[in-house]
Image (tube, helix red, strand yellow):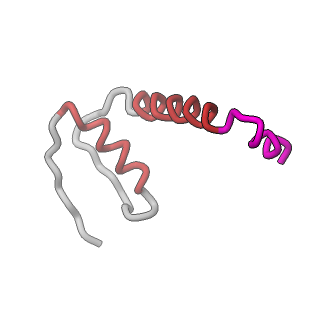
Amino acid sequence: MQTIHIDVNDNYVNKLVNILENLKGIMLEDIKVDKKIDSLDEPRAEFMNAQSISMAKTWDNSVDKAWDDL
């Protein structure tokens, strides 16, 4: 296992940790952050909300209604 130290601009810490959390268990074994990260779930919640709205519009048509029963 290798260890990498990355210095991150404070404005991007939440975004980078969010990305790294998604790689945990796949490429990363552990993530340690020096200071507490406030509202870590906030960017993730915003993304999930935007994604679900986008997907609802994508699948909202008569051709795809057949998949609703599955």
Residue 39 occupies quadrant: top left
Judge left or right: residue 51 versus residue 30: right
- Membership of 3 in magenta stretch: no
Residue at 14% over, 46% down: 7
Give how far across and how far down residue 61 sits, in percent: 71, 35
Q: Residue furthest right?
A: 69
Q: Is residue 13 above or below residue 22?
A: above
Q: Nearer the viewer, residue 3 or 44?
A: 44
Judge left or right: residue 7 versus residue 46: left
Q: Is residue 25 above or below residue 36?
A: below
Q: Is residue 25 above or below residue 70?
A: below
Q: Nearer the viewer, residue 32 or 9?
A: 9
Judge left or right: residue 51 versus residue 3: right
Give how far across and how far down residue 63 sits, in percent: 76, 42
The rendered magenta stretch, by its main secondary structure, is classed as helix
Look at the image and give the residue range highlighted in magenta: 59-70
